[in-house]
Image (tube, helix red, strand yellow):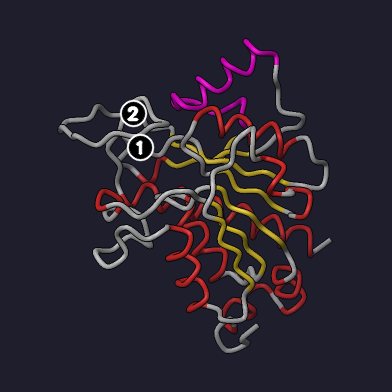
Amino acid sequence: MNQTSFSRLELLVGSEAMQHISQTKVIIFGVGGVGGWCAESLVRSGICHLTIVDSDEVSPTNVNRQIMATSATVGEPKVNVMCQRLLEINPEAEITALHKTYSAETKEDFHLEQYDYVIDAIDSLKDKIQLILHATSIDSVTLFSSMGAALRTDPFSVRCAEFWKVRNDTLGAIMRKRMRQRKMMPSKKFLCVYSDELPQPNRGNTDETCDYKAQINGTMCHVTATFGFALASLVINDLLKNSSR
């Protein structure tokens, strides 16, 4: 690891913690408005072993909130653009970019047992539930999940809570309902990043469509980025807590 690039971080947390962080393996599912900022923060915080998973390409509608999305990257796979950016931050990092979808059919391809942390920033409801059930079934894995960041404007309302205690979040409520109906519960508790701001209505119109979303909702960069940074902080602070034991 480039000591000069991370000297201010080491000054704060110490060399032993830096070593612990650099050896940790993290996988992020979804590198859009939330996951992309999480990946950025993790690599800038010393994570050197990171896998990023996303099947989408950069769209013009991503530019308002996704860190890899610019007029120059439209049409490129998100994970490829993000990987290049992360390696420019730390050329010594091992970044694996997987341009594919996580689903019930592909879940075994990702070998989650190889990772210390799994970050869920998936938009698709059924795939999100599948990932949560999968990740929580592995004792050695710590899962952190993002709830809905759309239709919010206040970054100061972003919170962290255990999944069953998340409030004012439509996505989380639907997931809990489906899990109860199907009697498919997470094997252990996990923390979520969410907003307790009540969702606002869409006030504009769009022709944009998405196969895995019933509705396209408005989003703001300062909210999605706060979600991503909060997820990264859960990983780093958990590592710091464990390294001090």
Q: Amino acid at mark 1?
A: Ala
Q: Amino acid at mark 2?
A: Pro
Q: Position of residue 43 (x, y in %)?
A: 56, 69
Q: Which mark is residue 199?
A: 2
Label 1 close to label 2 by CB (< 8 Å): yes
- Prevailing secondary structure class for the magenta stretch in the rendered image: helix
Q: From the viewer's perspective, tell me whether residue 193 is left or right of residue 133.
A: left
- Looking at the rendered image, the quarter that the C terminus falls into is bottom right
Magenta segment: 162-183
Nearer to the camera, 98 or 194:
98
How much space separates mark 1 and mark 2, taking CA atoms?
8 Å
Q: Crowding near pointer 2: few (<14 within 10 Å), some, many (20+)?
A: some
Q: What's the residue at 35%, 55% (across, down)?
A: 58
Q: From the viewer's perspective, tell me whether residue 61 is left or right of residue 197.
A: left
Q: From the viewer's perspective, tell me whether residue 148 is left or right of residue 45.
A: left
Please report whichever mark, 1 or 2, sits nearer to the chain's N-terminal start: 1
As drawn, 215 above or below 112: above
As drawn, 225 above or below 218: below
SS for callout 1: loop
Q: What's the residue at 58%, 69% (across, down)?
A: 45
Query: Does the magenta run of residues contain 119?
Result: no
Q: Residue furthest bottom?
A: 4
Q: What's the residue at 60%, 64% (across, down)?
A: 96
Q: Crowding near pointer 1: few (<14 within 10 Å), some, many (20+)?
A: some
Disc nearest the viewer among 1 and 2: 1
Q: Position of residue 41 (x, y in %)?
A: 51, 64
- Looking at the rendered image, the quarter that the N terminus falls into is bottom right
Q: What's the residue at 34%, 34% (across, down)?
A: 210
Residue tagged by mark 1?
A: 150
Q: Residue furthest top?
A: 181
Q: Residue furthest left?
A: 204
